[in-house]
Image: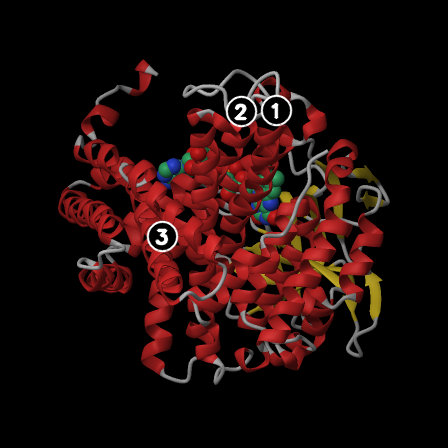
Amino acid sequence: MPTYQAPIADMRYLLNDFLEIGRYDNLPGFSDASQDVVDAILEEGAKLTQEVLHPLNQSADEEGCHWSTDGVTTPKGFKEAYKTFVDGGWPSLTCEPEHGGQGLPTVLGIAFSEMIISSNMSFGTYPGLARGAYEAIKRSGSDAQKALYLPKLASGEWGGTMNLTEPHCGTDLGLLRTKAEPQADGSYQITGTKIFISAGEQDLTDNIIHLVLARLPDAPEGIRGISLFIVPKFIVKEDGSLGARNGVTCGSIEHKMGLKGSSTCVMNYDNATGYLIGDAHKGMRAMFVMMNEARLGVGVQGLGLSEVAYQNAAAYAKERIQGRSLSGVAHPDKAADPIIVHPDVRRMLLNARAFNEGARALAMWTALHIDLSEKHPDDAVRKDADDLVGLIMPVLKAFLTDTGFESVNLSLQCFGGHGYIREHGMEQFVRDARITQLYEGTSGIQALDLVGRKLPQGTGRLLRQFFHPVDQFIQDNADDKELGDIVMNLAKSFARLQQATAWIAENGLKNPMEAGAASSDYLKMFGLVALGFMWGRMAKVSTGKIADGAGDKAFHENKVKLARYYMTKVLPDTSSLMSKIMAGADPVMSFAEEAF
Ligand SMILES: Cc1cc2nc3c(=O)[nH]c(=O)nc-3n(C[C@H](O)[C@H](O)[C@H](O)COP(=O)(O)OP(=O)(O)OC[C@H]3O[C@@H](n4cnc5c(N)ncnc54)[C@H](O)[C@@H]3O)c2cc1C
């Protein structure tokens, strides 16, 4: 059975030393996040995830969810765990105080989210989707809608869902057919079928607030004719109590590769009562605004699974004995050496660990910018932070899930054939991780978003929010003796990223196929450099701590070693990506359709 220990030492390091969140104690939410509060949340969060959620992860995978015409039953133990989760006030951690939330910063919420995912990603989808519905209503709902729905979503009393996908449309939502007919009382009747709806039906909450994309009768065709509706499972009366059962039912649940404790539902809307959120035909805009956080959440799923898989692989590599070290017998007391002595096993473990700690830094750095974009009193700071978040989000979503999957797979590889056997739990991590590259927009679609929308936006305004600080960091630290080689390696890859960006800007403008063919390689290169920037900055912080004799010396020395590993053994992959980008679209597009 796999084990999990929440990486709270690393999370503390990122919050206190790397991001120095104490600097922002004049901002709402941060003023409440004193050191004591942060420590208590990390420690209590670790306890909850290790002791309550993690023990249910494997059994939930074995059992899955159950469907009947009465609804969906979640795996054994989920109901009790959900009650513990709600009683502890966890759903409301980062919700607004005016809705009964604790108003704590997103950056802290992200650390806790990672723990939930590592311990039990399926369980995490239920509060995760409710959180998505909370955000959508908070950002686009009327005051009356906010008052009616948000406190109970924040408390965890009600669940929530996001209903975009239909059988014939996933990526291209312009094709969606679900209809919304206006009624005399100002409500709408929603009719249509949605598929793949996470947490669409469950037995954890008294009500479920579905957020549904549908088309009004006079809607323009395509993506510009889509509106967003609240469709509660039980109609909510004006006083907040539950009324009649609405015309929405779960027709069936999917049998999936992984994420089996999370119900993935076919939802049938049959003249269900719905309420428009925001403006008619502007549903996609409302969805996009809240998608930033959803994409960050999915990126963190890649990280969370990679972390738990790494922890188990590292423990196994220290125990499993096979062969002798290439430099002679390392453990003469044993019949063979533990496999951790072998350079190739270390390569797999260090790739995973360098990814985990770099990805955690990137996710928390981005989350901090979400906080700044929402809470900082200075308009210019808010705008710059928002630009950075917009730019990084597709990179974070796709790079953390693609590399997270590779990394989970490497951790399985450390187990040899035993990794393929269920009891070790590694094959579940691989199966669970695979979905993260698909939902909330596939990795390919994130890459197109990056090159097609984010790079050209504001003639490179978004890009400057990332390029300037990287450039500045390199200039400021190029002569630092402790960091010299680390900065030099970052500078080389950053130069490649700048060159690739210019190449795409020039060639993509002439022929969009060039941008399309380069997009996935470019996003990967961007992700590698983004983690490189994080590693450069962490090395700077940790070399400073070592020089000052501050903190845990061994912790900081390992950080610097891992930074060097990343810079010399991982980041140089930007070189081959550069060659692939420069090869252009012809090798891809010269194949005739019928030749496939
Ligand atoms: C377990 C699970 C849970 C889910 N949860 C939810 C949920 O809660 N709510 C919800 O609404 N949906 C949900 N989904 C749906 C998910 O978001 C979609 O499956 C996903 O967006 C992809 O859509 P699709 O499956 O229709 O693939 P398609 O859109 O058919 O794409 C197929 C392939 O073509 C590529 N492709 C498509 N268009 C382009 C293009 N223009 N350029 C380049 N490549 C392209 C894609 O990248 C992909 O590789 C879930 C799915 C699963 C499996």
Residue 30's spot in the image, x, y percent? 53, 78
Q: Which residue is found at the position 38% from the left and 46% from the top?
A: 561
> For the residues marked 1 and 2, what is the alpha-carbon distance in whole angstroms?
6 Å
Q: Which residue is found at the position 54% from the left and 63% from the top?
A: 12
Which residue is identified by label 1? 320
Q: Residues within 10 Å of mark 1 (few under 14, many from 20)?
A: some
Task: Looking at the image, tell me whether mark 3 or mark 1 is earlier in sequence order.
Answer: 1
Q: Residues within 10 Å of mark 2 (few under 14, many from 20)?
A: many
Q: Quadrant of residue 140?
A: bottom right
Which residue is identified by label 2? 339
Asked whether residue 479 appears in the rendered view, the answer is: yes
Q: Does the CB distance between marks 1 and 2 fall below 8 Å?
A: yes
Q: Which residue is found at the position 80% from the left and 38% from the top?
A: 67
Type of amino acid at the residue the image marks with label 1:
Arg
Type of amino acid at the residue the image marks with label 2:
Ile
* Mark 1 Cβ and ligand 1 under 8 Å apart: no
Q: Secondary structure at mark 3?
A: helix
* Image: 322 above or below 480: above
Which residue is identified by label 3? 535
